[in-house]
Amino acid sequence: MKKNWWKALTVVLLLYVAVAGLLMPVPRLAILNETIRNLYFHVPMWFGMTFILVASVVYSVRYLRNPSVELDIRSHEAARTGILMGCVGLATGSIWAKYTWGTWWTNDPKLNGAAIAMLIYGAYLVLRSSFTDEQQRARVSAIYNIFAFATAMPLFYILPRLTDSLHPGAGGNPAFARYDLDNDMRLVFYPAVIGWTLLAFWLAQVASRIALLKQKVYEKQLV
Amino acid sequence: MRNSLSKLRPAFLLLLALLLPVVHAAAQSAADTPEMADALRHDGKIYVVVAVITVVLAGLLALLVSLDRKVSRLERELKD
């Protein structure tokens, strides 16, 4: 139980975010109106995705230095969780865009950058599934994962800032300064980022453990 | 003068007694109704949405916790 305190923290934080995120006061802004509350749900998806993808790359590097089935599985499941969160982030962003910018999608550098980055990670899954040899699959996908991360992060966080963009946090827009000056929102936003990030790690951990068990059962059957 | 006032005292008291509920009613808002548990119906019933989202989230998290426990049990079983 001592090891699982962070899972209890995840439950508490997410339930708090669900209630406080809808009920705490927010700035009254034109166009945004109450959709400003999406900040507690859309943005943490990208935070969670970034952290879990960092974890995935760390596992990949460790795999390449010291190969083991466990590190490969952990890296893969972390990447899968990150891809899921990225897809949820794209979907929620698209809904938010429809009701504030008036369109589901626009050729904005931040949006297209995120979409391309997700495609790069989609290729990771395709690449992984195309190998039959386990060691080859693990090694090549670990290498690809490192390159995917190094390509995706500038697409998410650097390139959109170099041009004009509608999206906050791009085109010289400060990411949070405008909203985050509001201390009421900070009280929910930071717990939301921590809570959703912890949920990503929790999901990845359970998925990895199931994959490891599968591997163990498979090995036992071979003996 | 003193006599007439003392004779009217019961009438004043009665009037006061009759008027008291009116004063009480006037002090309250026009749309006053019996007190009900209205909290969930305030603010465009947003609290109902909050309750629904909380239940959904709690359900999903409970599923994740139970999955986590099942995996732990399997891990223990496979260790032997």
Image: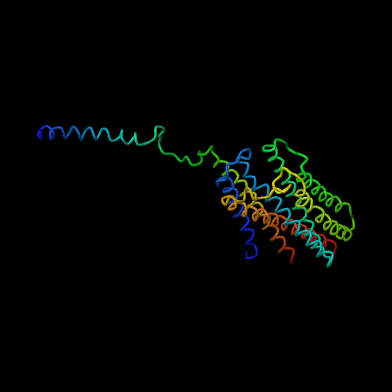
Seen in the picture, residue A113 relative to B15 is either above or below; the reply is: below
Name the residue nearer the viewer: A131 or B1. Answer: B1
In the rendered image, which quarter contains the C terminus of chain A? bottom right
Q: Residue at the location (79% across, 53% down)?
A: A154
Q: Position of residue A106 (x, y in %)?
A: 76, 39
Q: Residue at the location (47% across, 39% down)?
A: B38
Q: What is the image's colouring?
A: rainbow
In the rendered image, which quarter contains the N terminus of chain A? bottom right
Q: Residue B19 falls in which quadrant of the image?
A: top left
Q: Position of residue A216 (x, y in %)?
A: 79, 62
Seen in the picture, residue A66 relative to A42 is either above or below; the reply is: below
Name the residue nearer the viewer: A164 or A180. Answer: A164
Relative horizontal placement of residue A41, taking residue B5 as reference (left or right): right
Total numbered circles: 0
Q: Position of residue B1 (x, y in %)?
A: 10, 33
Q: Residue at the location (72% across, 48% down)?
A: A172
Q: Residue A30 falls in which quadrant of the image?
A: top right
Q: Position of residue B8 (x, y in %)?
A: 15, 32
Name the residue nearer the viewer: B56 or A199. Answer: A199
Q: Residue A7 falls in which quadrant of the image?
A: bottom right
